[in-house]
Amino acid sequence: MSSRLDRWKCLLLAAMMAPTGWLLGQGPVPAFPSMEAPRIGQPRAIATEVKLKVGHAEIAFSGAWAPLERNGKVLGFYLKGSGEFTYTSTFEPEGPVVARNLKEWCSEKAADFQRNRTVKVLFTEGRIFLAGMTGFSPDGSPAESLDGAYGGFKTRWDRVDDHVPLHLLAQQESNAPSQPVLIAELEEGGRKWLYTFDGVDQLEETLRIGEPFRGSDPELKGWEYLVKLSSQYIGWDPRKALPPVHFQVSGLDVDLQTRDNREVTMAVEESILTREAGQQVFRFELWNDLVLEKDTRHLKLRRILDGEGKPVAFSHTHDCLAVYLPAPAAPAVPFTLRFEYEGDFLIRPASGSYWQLGVRAAWYPMPVNLSSESYLFHGVVRTTGDWTAFLPGDTVRRVREGEWNVVETRTTKPINFATILGGKYFLDEETQAGLTVRIATYATKPGDVNKVFKSQAFNIIKYYQNFLGPFPFKEFLIVEKNEWGYGQAPPGMMYITRDAFEQAQNVKDWEAVAELMDTLNRRGYSGRLSVKTMDVRHVFAHEIAHQYWGIVVKMPSPLDQWITESFADFCAALYDGDYKGKSRFEKNVSMWRGQAGDSSDKAPIPLANELIEKDSRDRFFTHRNLLYAKGPTLLNALYQEVGDRVFLTWLKSAQATFRWKFATTKQMFDLLSFITKKDYTPFYETYYWGLQIPPSHH
């Protein structure tokens, strides 16, 4: 696991294989002027304690220090001696989250935080980068050299995954030189603490702690990932406004080819639209190296070209990418960047006959802000042999060209969450009323189960069109994955695991399985049974609902994920009830309320992703209970209060108002208030941002 918490990975500064395939010839890469590492300057000793305050943090220090300089400019300081760092959380909703995070990862800090909402760290070494602020200018008498100590400190922090302070400093220097940035890397014994005050990009101050990677791979040794303990917001409030967006990827064009389903060459073109003046440095996430249990995979970015084919300066390290334009981009005028790269980063789960480049995985240059992605997608994928690929959008062509199986797709509306999957698949399809439902079965030819799934998909889509509006795509693709126990819904697609196919073949009464799943869920069961269990009808309905909630109406940040998950699950329950009767709907309601009660005291719904429990099983159930149980419980309370007609009007109005746009939860409640002429702010604050569960209407 890592800072992404779902895969083995860390940066390795390894040499890469020579370029292959159709990538264009190499050219000189322009220099990135603010990427040169600073050098340590003349050390000094501080006799009197000095203090630095920023945001909700304060650093006090005495001992030896040395400036970190580049081209005569001081970027920060290296500290060695005795220091105290204090951090206070004043964002009320995160109180229980921070307390539990501290208990999980550094239990000795939890009690103090619960008393005064403050974390105190006593550190002996530290490095502070700062820009756009004054007030920290330590002096002192000459001291002994700190070169050796600083070299060791730098080496240790260079082995922290997803952490490149120079990228944020470059962004501040070029994009917003008057805005404050501070990055404090502190060591308390053998523990790393990272405090960041980002007044330029994310507009957040965060507190993180380092955690060693666990695993037998020797290349993981010495590497750590960061666990976020707290986030507070600078100049904006997520309860009231959209997150800051400085630029948006408005077009994503992918060209991928692979001969062996491991090695891949890619060219990705992104159309980018800036929202404000002065934007010259752009930050993305993009894989470097992925450490698996058996081997290490690599992605090598060869070059970036602008719209005129000229090379652009960049820095790519630690799965982070910073791009430096020759001049600031003009606001509201789109420009294009072409990224050319290659590597062996196609990973086949359990050595099976498929690979996937997943949702919100950094296989293409991905903006850090979720709301910076809303793009028209075009993709071409070339595979060989009997492998074929699947990707979002209407099919432009699916043909054989020489040795290549070529698939090309295109969307006509802006999406996010693009994904590509390639493997040994057989296709089956049916068209009704202008909609094509296509089934891709893994490694086996289509069977009778495909008829069931196509019929089910058409029925669910027809049902949703009554109150959510027209289905957003001309094609809907259902892809079988050789895994167990889940579904996922990228744009115009559904991934669903093989147990759904087996169950549809072998279990005639899906309701019996649904009953069993209800019982298992209430008991918190997470294992596998000899008889595979999945409430296939509900999973289908939930994943198809994501085409409306998540794809058409988009969540602008993880704080609004309930718009994706809770609304989708409630719509699926409405389908359950209309198909099988009120009792089936009521069973969903009962299950939601029971699961919500198991986790409602841990975190409010919007902070479900901010609570990081060590045990992956606990983390899974907490996340599920908040977004898939408490969220639908809130929706059911509203449904019972306003009635069926008004509630469905709200859903349909949301789909019309925010069609192909981002919507915050606040905007959703404002729309409900407009429809009903009632203020739902207290409900929003008490149940969504608070820990309480609305009372039952029964």
Image (cartoon, grey):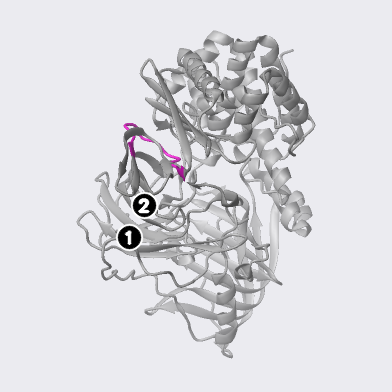
Asked whether the residues under the numbered discs 2 and 1 touch, taking CB atoms below 8 Å apart as contact, a structural biologist would say yes
Q: Which mark is residue 368?
A: none
Picture quarter with the C terminus? top right
Q: Which residues are magenta?
A: 408-422
Locate residue 507, reporting x and y percent.
Answer: 68, 22
Residue 670 visible in rendering: yes
Disc 2 marks a residue whose amino acid type is: Gln
Determine the secondary structure under disc 1: loop
Q: Is 414 a magenta residue?
A: yes
Tell me if 305 is positioned left or right of 436 in this view: left
Secondary structure category for the residue under label 2: strand
Image quadrant where one finds the N terminus: bottom right
In percent of width and height, residue 124 lies at 67, 75
Q: Amino acid at mark 1?
A: Gly
Upstream in the sequence, badge 2 or badge 1? 1
Q: Which residue is mark 2?
A: 257
Q: Residue at x 69, y 55 (%)?
A: 118
Instruction: Give residue 169's position: percent from left, percent from top.
Output: 43, 64
- Mark 2 surroundings: few (<14), some (14-19) or many (≥20) residues within 10 A: many
Query: Residue 356: x, y in percent?
Result: 49, 46
CA distance for labels 2 and 1: 8 Å
Evaluate whether residue 278 shows in this view.
no
Residue at 52 percent across and 68 percent down: it is 12
- Quarter of the image holding residue 695? top right
Looking at the magenta stretch, what is its main secondary structure? loop
Q: Nearer the viewer, residue 685 or 447?
A: 447
- Residue furthest to the left in view is 308
> Between 270 and 39, which is closer to the camera in this rendering?
270
Residue for badge 1: 21
Residue at left 56%, top 20%?
571
Q: Is residue 262 left or right of residue 325?
A: right
Q: How many marks?
A: 2
